[in-house]
Image (cartoon, helix red, strand yellow):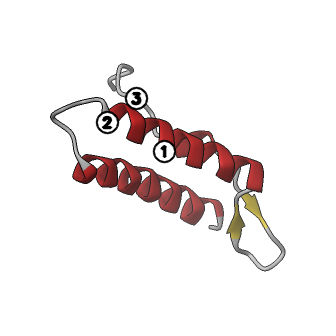
């Protein structure tokens, strides 16, 4: 396993199971995720080789990771 690969910001979020069996993220953690995405977008904006497609890819990567974690949490 390559330890040099950056982990998605969504890996650090708390996931809480509610009484209805659904997975939820505390609002504070959602704010942290949104700030991480904004930071990534700013970093991509400064790179002339990156555009909105790159930013969308980064957001999809975070969403996929979070979706998988939520599914695992509710099993």
The secondary structure type at the circle numbered 1 is helix
* N-terminal-most mark, 2 or 1: 1
Mark sitting earlier along the chain (1/3): 3
**How far from the left and from the top, in percent, is residue 35?**
58, 42
Going from the N terminus, do you reach mark 2 or mark 3 first?
Answer: 3
Kindly report the distance in space between the C-alpha atoms of the residues bearing marks 2 and 3: 15 Å
Residue at image location 35% in from the left, 19% down from the top: 4
Under circle 2, the secondary element is helix
Which class describes the residues within 10 Å of circle 3: few (<14), some (14-19), or many (20+)?
few
Image check: 45 left or right of 50? right
**Residue sticking out furthest to the bottom:** 20
User: Residue 37 shows which numbered tag?
Assistant: 1
- Kindly identify which residue carries mark 3: 6
Which residue does the image show at 23% across and 46% down from the upper left? 51
Residue 55 percent location from the top left of the image: 32, 48
In the displayed structure, 38 sits above or below 69; it is: above
| Quadrant of the image occupied by residue 7 | top left
User: Residue at the right extreme?
Assistant: 19
Q: CB under 8 Å between callouts 1 and 3? A: no
Give the class, few, some or many, for how many residues have Cα within 10 Å of label 1's Cα (few <14, many ≥20): some
* Disc 2 to disc 1, C-alpha distance: 10 Å
Q: Is residue 15 left or right of residue 49?
A: right
* Mark whose residue sits in front, 1 or 3: 1
The residues bearing labels 1 and 3 have C-alpha atoms spaced at a distance of: 14 Å
Q: Image quadrant of residue 46?
A: top left
Number of disc labels: 3
Expressed as whole percent of the image width and height from the top left, the position of residue 60 reads: 37, 57
| Residue indicated by mark 2 | 44
* Residue occupying the point 34% across, 26% down: 1
Q: Are marks 2 and 3 in contact (CB under 8 Å)?
A: no
């Amino acid at each position: 396993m390559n330890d040099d690969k950056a982990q998605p910001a969504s890996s650090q979020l708390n996931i809480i199971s509610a009484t209805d069996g659904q997975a939820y993220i505390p609002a504070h953690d959602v704010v942290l995720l949104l700030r991480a995405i904004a930071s990534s977008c700013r970093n991509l904006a400064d790179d002339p080789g990156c555009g909105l497609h790159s930013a969308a890819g980064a957001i999809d990567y975070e969403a996929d990771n979070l979706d998988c974690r939520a599914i695992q949490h509710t099993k």
